[in-house]
Image (cartoon, grey):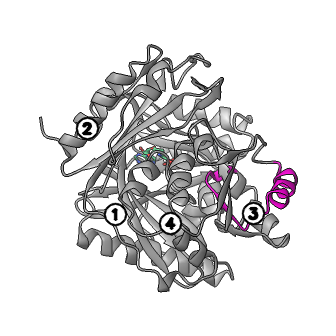
Amino acid sequence: MNIGLIGSGGREHALCKKLSESKKVNKIVCLPGNAGTSKIATNIDVDILDFKKILKLLKIYQIDLVVVGPEEPLVKGIVDFLKKNKILVFGPSKYASKLEGSKAFVKKLCKENNIPTAKFKICHKKSQVLKFLKRCNLPVVVKADGLAAGKGVTICHTKKKVINISSAIFAGQFKSSNKIVLEEFLEGEEASYFLIVDNNYFKFFGSAQDHKRVFENDKGPNTGGMGAYSPAPIINKSLEKKIINKIVKPTLRALKKKGQFYNGFLYVGLMIKKNEPFLIEYNIRMGDPECQVILPRLKTDLFKILLNTVLNKLKKINIKWKKSKSMTVVLCSKGYPGNYKKNSCIENINKVGLGNNDFIYHAGTRIKNDKVYSNGGRVLNITSIGNSFYGVRKKILSIINKINWKDGFYRKDIGWRVIKK
Ligand code: AMP
Ligand code: GLY
């Protein structure tokens, strides 16, 4: 089978690598891919929101199955479009993608189905915000309704900030959002729980904890993720049961009641408080960098899993995992998540000898004259698996030292919750 893989991040490099290991996979075309995927697949430069152009390319390259990595094409309906054109595609429909594409949609769904989540108010105008502020406690979380590339959520410690942020969103700061969700701030520990879902069934697809803040000790602004590890020990058996029964099942049931199905990866973003799960957000895709720590632990053929999901035969597949611990540290361009320079050569990357349990997944990179250059904020994901988080992190940091990229920085404390000082 020939695979078309949409996206260009570390998540897609990890998906590409795993898919390339399947005996059933003949060729992979990445749309557009990065320097890492170019070594194991064919990269074709294309705008991932230009569905018509993508369809043309899929036909030219005789693609049998499309796998969509990022959320934006999903929310904009790429799956419906390709299905209409008789292309087999892994990922949720436009309707189901509202689970990530509209925070107001999810909050209403939670309320209607008693799903535990932060108390909230959906506001369309400033007067509603002012009314809410009269009776709320600080901090308040302000969320733009639509996709905002990770920039749509602000935790506000003053009422003035709530008003300023809300006004900016109403004024069109994020094109995708004309309304906002105001939310109670939840204390607790965050964890991510992943599922793969078809029209009839769902299966566990790993757990992880991400590190969103840019600096060590969880300081500084939020990022797309500076590192992650898997599994997340906080997700014990009793908590898992609650996540399934109180959150996942009611959500899938609610979609079915509306005559809709979910098919694809489902990322359940949680706040855990006293062994109780609260839904913070859904994502309709694998996480990035969570995918880069989960896939190295997967023993079962990823292609078989994805194909069976598309064909609604997920129940037949036995998904097996390695017991090992996995971690990734993200090597970023200095200045990220603010301004950073691009096009800096990562000289030593090809000189680093990697063992069987070490992986470098590319994210913002491109290749020029056989050399790797930075091309984004998050540049490389250095990943390793092993018996202990302590040993794995040590290994990763030694690899980063060997790369010794002068324009890069990273957090040395990824996994602090599971590595005691
Ligand atoms: P979201 O895009 O909804 O995942 O929000 C981004 C991040 O903001 C989350 O990963 C949390 O760290 C934080 N966050 C969002 N909602 C809340 C909340 N109600 N209480 C506390 N933190 C939150
Ligand atoms: N690492 C967070 C995300 O993928 O949304």
Q: Amino acid at mark 4?
A: Leu
325 horizontally vs 354: left or right: left
Q: CA distance from mark 4 to mark 1?
A: 28 Å
Quickly name the residue at label 1: 277
Residue found 36% across the figure and 33% down from its top: 353
Q: CA distance from mark 4 to mark 3?
A: 17 Å
User: Mark 2 against mark 3, which lies toward the viewer?
Assistant: 3
Find numbered disc 4 in the image and state the secondary structure of the residue it sits on: helix
The disc placed on residue 63 is 3
The answer as to whether callout 2 falls within 8 Å of ligand 2 is no
357 horizontally vs 24: left or right: left
Quickly name the residue at label 2: 393
Find numbered disc 1 in the image and state the secondary structure of the residue it sits on: strand
Q: Earlier in the sequence, mark 4 or mark 2?
A: 4
Residue found 24% across the figure and 50% down from its top: 386
Q: Using the rendered view, name the quadrant where residue 208 is placed.
A: bottom left
Residue 313 location (% of width, % of height): 56, 84
Q: Earlier in the sequence, mark 4 or mark 3?
A: 3
Residue 37 shows in the view: yes
Where 418 sits versus 365, above or below? below
Quickly name the residue at label 4: 302
Q: CA distance from mark 2 to mark 3?
A: 38 Å
Q: Residues within 10 Å of mark 1 (few under 14, many from 20)?
A: many
Residue 256 location (% of width, % of height): 62, 82
Residue 346 location (% of width, % of height): 50, 21
Where 352 sits versus 310, above or below? above
Q: CA distance from mark 1 to mark 3?
A: 40 Å
Q: Using the rendered view, name the quadrant where residue 121 is placed.
A: bottom right
Span shown in magenta: 50-72
Residue found 54% across the figure and 77% down from its top: 252
User: Mark 2 against mark 1, which lies toward the viewer?
Assistant: 2
Q: Residues within 10 Å of mark 3 (few under 14, many from 20)?
A: many
